[in-house]
Amino acid sequence: MTRLIPSFLLILSIASCGGGGSANSNGSSESSTDVSGKAIDGYISGARVFLDLNFNGLRDVNEPSTVSVAEGDFNFGLTDSEPDCASYVPIVVDVPSGANLW
């Protein structure tokens, strides 16, 4: 069974959809902004956290995502290739059965 935790349960910090330049894995230079926060309902580690760019509630291949770690911490980056509205779309926390609740 999977639970979706509404984004209002997240402690979240988003700078903006732009930021300092950095080189990505293929060597090209793009701006990057980190999105980080905590998945909480108690702390949740092992949850899939993603930015729902198309508002469909599902993690699509092109959407930034990560897995929460100890104490619910998560972090992923956005680049200039992400839509400008990225700071306004939902952050979805998908909690699979077996995720650790603290």
Image (spheres, grey):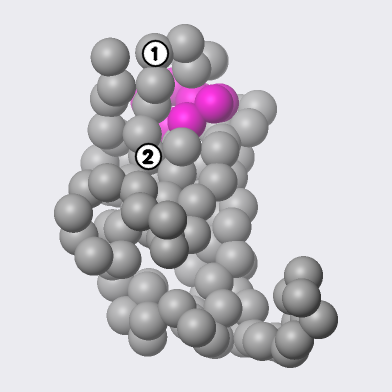
| Residue 93 image label | 2
Check if residue 41 falls in the magenta segment: yes
Residue 33: % across, % down: 59, 75
Specify start and end residues of the magenta stretch as a single range.
40-47
Q: Residues within 10 Å of mark 2 (few under 14, many from 20)?
A: many
In whole angstroms, how far apart are the C-alphas of marks 1 and 2? 13 Å
Residue 13 visible here: no
- Residue 36 on image: x %, y %: 56, 55
Amino acid at the residue labelled 1 = Ser
Q: Give the residue drawn at x 55%, y 46%.
A: 66
- Say which element carries label 2: strand
Task: Give the quadrant of the N terminus.
Answer: top left
Mark number, residue 97 = 1
Residue drawn at (54%, 26%) of the image: 46
Query: Quarter-wise, where is residue 18 in the image?
Result: bottom right
Residue 65: which numbered mark, if any? none
Q: Main secondary structure of the magenta part?
A: loop
* Closer to us: 52 or 18: 52
| Dot in front, 1 or 2 | 1
In which quadrant of the rendered view does residue 84 lie? bottom left
Please tell me whether mark 1 sits on a helix, a strand or a loop: loop
- Asked whether, in this view, residue 20 is left or right of residue 58, the answer is right
Identify which amino acid the numbered label 2 is placed on.
Val
Q: Position of residue 22 (x, y in %)?
A: 76, 82
Q: In this view of the protein, can residue 19 be seen by the observer?
A: yes
Q: Residue at x 48, y 59 (%)?
A: 64
Query: Looking at the picture, does residue 75 appear above or below residue 96?
Result: below
